[in-house]
Image (spheres, helix red, strand yellow):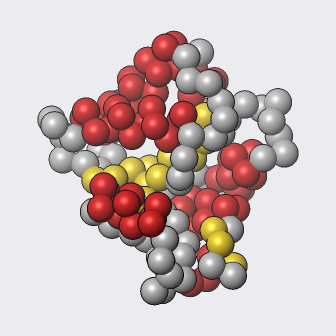
Amino acid sequence: MKVAVIGHRRFAVTPQIQQVIYEQLEGLINQGAEKFCFAFKGAFFDSCHGALSEFKENYHIKLVYYRAVYPGENDGVADSLATLYGQKYFDESVCKEGADDVNKRNQFMIDDCGVLFTLFDKKLNKSATAEAVAYAKQKGKKIINVLDLI
């Protein structure tokens, strides 16, 4: 099973939220999740990455970083993450003038995964995360919103 990890970039991850993230990610692994597909940046990204890096010591899981870049483009951030995760994902259809088109990237990730693991504050309904959750619902994907579990 593949899991898309998408959440608000600028949302404070409290110890309580961190605990739910940890428990839910381990639960997904125990249910057969083997690949976790990440969007980029923020406290949610950092929290999920930290927990999954810890789990890699005991479980056979893979972390994949999704970022659309043009072939041959010099992108130091993507290259650093590619080294960290062992992979840089590229899909020409989500490129827009060499910049990351967040909503298209998120849709591509959701289409590629069975589960959306998110930190989505429903008060922030005009965000890329809100669009990702709406898209996942439309596609009938399982959605785990950390904030619904607190």
Lateral position of residue 12 relative to residue 52, left or right: right
Percent coordinates x, y for residue 64 in the rendering: 38, 58
- Vertical placement of 134 versus 101: above or below? above
**Residue at horizontal 30 percent and vertical 62 percent from the top:** 83
Instruction: Name the spot of residue 106 as percent of width and height, x first.
Output: 61, 60
Task: Please state the total of marks drawn on the protein image.
Answer: 0
Q: How far across and down, in percent of the image, does residue 96 sit? A: 69, 79
Residue 4 visible from this viewpoint = no
Residue ID at (68%, 52%): 132
Q: Residue 119 falls in which quadrant of the image?
A: top right
Whether residue 44 is situated above or below residue 102 in the rendered picture: above
In the image, residue 105 sits, relative to residue 26, either above or below, namely below
In the foreground, 14 or 55: 14
Which residue lies at the image location 55% right of the left edge and 72% below the top edge? 68
* Rendered-image quadrant of the C terminus: top right
**Residue in view at x 33 percent, y 46 percent:** 33
Q: Residue 1 or 23: which is nearer the viewer?
A: 23
Q: Residue furthest left?
A: 58
Tell me residue 42's x, y (percent).
Answer: 56, 40
- For residue 85, which quarter of the picture? bottom left
Residue 140 appears anywhere in the view: yes
